[in-house]
Each structure stands twice: as structure tokens, then as C-alpha cells.
Image: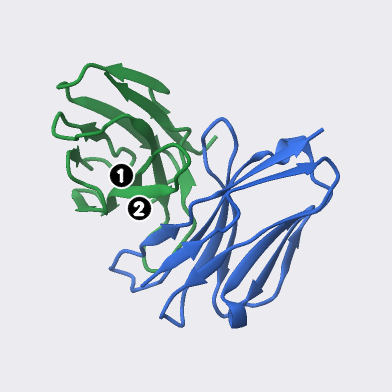
């Protein structure tokens, strides 16, 4: 089955610790994205990547970092610099840019930092 | 600037009723794309439809239908004979296609939470 996997589904961390969220896709998509969703709100873009070894900041990149060493993988690190990291994080992928293809989403990771 | 408005924050209907979710968008481009996504309680967004700005034909897929009207900048979503499984948050989204090499930013609306009561 083709799709996007995110792990873990729930993650708990102490304040001051960095944490890495996993995102893997086997859809052969070029583009991948990370969104943050807060309760009762829409999605906000953190980072996106159009191709391996390239990524760009989204609207709320401060306190986050990513890497894209493989086409299938786009991990997100929530650093201690992120002031309010508790949120629901969604990873997505789509075919190449320029045609506004629909995005396919993973099941999400709910991060709680105390 | 791009903007997507979903004025209905929460809607409750009784099973088998029809329900329409409103979506109003703002864009300066003539070429753009509109989307609807469903987010059930499990959290994963599910893609429902993609429509480009040059195709104003209404679309029907089973109990789902979409009404795209450029004159009013609206892309409304109707569920006919609603079912409990339709309970979810529904997001409307807008993207302006730039070029093959640039990023097509997707703007999501705030979502409408639909509850279908048995």
C-alpha cells in the first residue's frame, strides 16, 4: 500500500529537549511538507522540500529544522528554541511543483512538551 | 493576497439531512486551484477534490457535490443524506500555480467542524 507514515503517533518531551518527528512516503512524490495544527485552527506550513537535498522555510519555521537526504524521508526536528512546541504535526507529500497537485497526508504526530 | 474563509465554524445536522459547507476565497491570479480535505477524528487529512480555475463545472461524487462559482469566489461543498461517518472537520484550500520550479503555496481555511447526529 502506498502512503505516508509518521511516527510516533504520540510523543511526550520535557521542555528544553530537541525531538525529531519521522515522516516517510512511498508514493514516489518529489515534494514533501510539514504543517503544524493547533486546536481549532487550520494548518500552518513549517517547511517544505521540492527535491532531495533542498528545502525551504514556510510561514513558521523558527525553532524547527529539517533534512531531505532521501526522496522518501523528510524528518522534522523540534528544537528547544521553539517557544510553544505542543501541537499536532502533519507531514504531507505531492507530485512535482508548478501544477498545484493535491497533497497526501500522514496520520500525524501529537507532540506534548511539559 | 490569498485568503480562504470558511465562515461556518461548527455545524450540526441530523443524519440523512443535506448540509452545505461554505468556502469563499480571495486571489489576484487567474490561474489557481481549489481543494477540499476531510479531517476525521483520527487526524489524518483526506483529499476530496481538486479543481482548477478554468473549470467551473459542478462535480458530483456519490453523496458529495461541489459548486464552484467564480463570480462569487466560492467553492461550496454539499453532502447529501449525511451519515455519522461524515462527522469531521472539512478544510477548503487555495493554491496559486506559479511555475514548475517554484513552490505552489497552499492556503488552508480555518475549517468547518461537522457533526452528524444519529
Residue A71 higher or lower than B4, as above or below: above
Q: Colour of chain A?
A: green
Q: Mark 2–mark 1 contact, CB under 8 Å? A: yes
Residue A23 higher or lower than A35, as above or below: above
Chain letter for mark 2, please: A
Residue B7: quarter of image:
bottom right
Residue A74: quarter of image:
top left
Front one among B98 and B28? B28
Q: Could you tell me which residue is drawn at 17 percent across and 25 percent down?
A: A18
Q: Position of residue B96 (x, y in %)?
A: 41, 71
Q: Quadrant of the N terminus of chain B?
A: bottom left
| Horizontal side of residue B35 vs A50, given as left or right | right
Which comes before the other along the chain, label 2 or label 1?
2
- Colour blue, chain: B
Which mark, by number, is residue A71?
Answer: 1
| Horizontal side of residue B6 vs A110, given as left or right | right
Q: Which residue is mark 2?
A: A30
Amino acid at each position: 500500500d502506498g502512503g505516508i507514515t509518521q511516527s510516533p503517533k504520540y510523543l511526550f518531551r520535557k521542555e528544553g529537549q530537541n525531538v525529531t518527528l519521522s515522516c516517510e512516503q512511498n508514493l514516489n512524490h518529489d515534494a514533501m511538507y510539514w504543517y503544524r495544527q493547533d486546536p481549532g485552527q487550520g494548518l500552518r506550513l513549517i517547511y517544505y522540500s521540492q527535491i532531495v537535498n533542498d528545502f525551504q522555510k514556510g510561514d513558521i519555521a523558527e525553532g524547527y529544522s529539517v533534512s531531505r537526504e532521501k526522496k522518501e524521508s523528510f524528518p522534522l526536528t523540534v528544537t528547544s528554541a521553539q517557544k510553544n512546541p505542543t501541537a499536532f504535526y502533519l507531514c504531507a507529500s505531492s507530485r512535482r511543483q508548478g501544477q498545484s497537485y493535491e497533497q497526501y497526508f500522514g496520520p500525524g504526530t501529537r507532540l506534548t512538551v511539559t | 493576497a490569498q485568503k480562504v474563509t470558511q465562515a461556518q465554524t461548527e455545524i450540526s445536522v441530523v443524519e440523512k439531512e443535506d448540509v452545505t459547507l461554505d468556502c469563499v476565497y480571495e486571489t489576484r491570479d487567474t490561474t489557481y486551484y481549489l481543494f477540499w480535505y476531510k479531517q476525521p477524528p483520527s487526524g489524518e487529512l483526506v483529499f476530496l477534490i481538486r479543481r482548477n480555475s478554468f473549470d467551473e463545472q459542478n462535480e458530483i461524487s456519490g453523496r458529495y457535490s461541489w459548486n464552484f462559482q467564480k463570480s462569487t469566489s466560492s467553492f461550496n461543498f454539499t453532502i447529501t443524506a449525511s451519515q455519522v461517518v461524515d462527522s469531521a472537520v472539512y478544510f477548503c484550500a487555495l493554491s496559486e500555480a506559479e511555475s514548475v520550479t517554484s513552490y505552489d503555496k497552499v492556503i488552508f481555511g480555518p475549517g468547518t467542524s461537522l457533526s452528524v447526529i444519529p
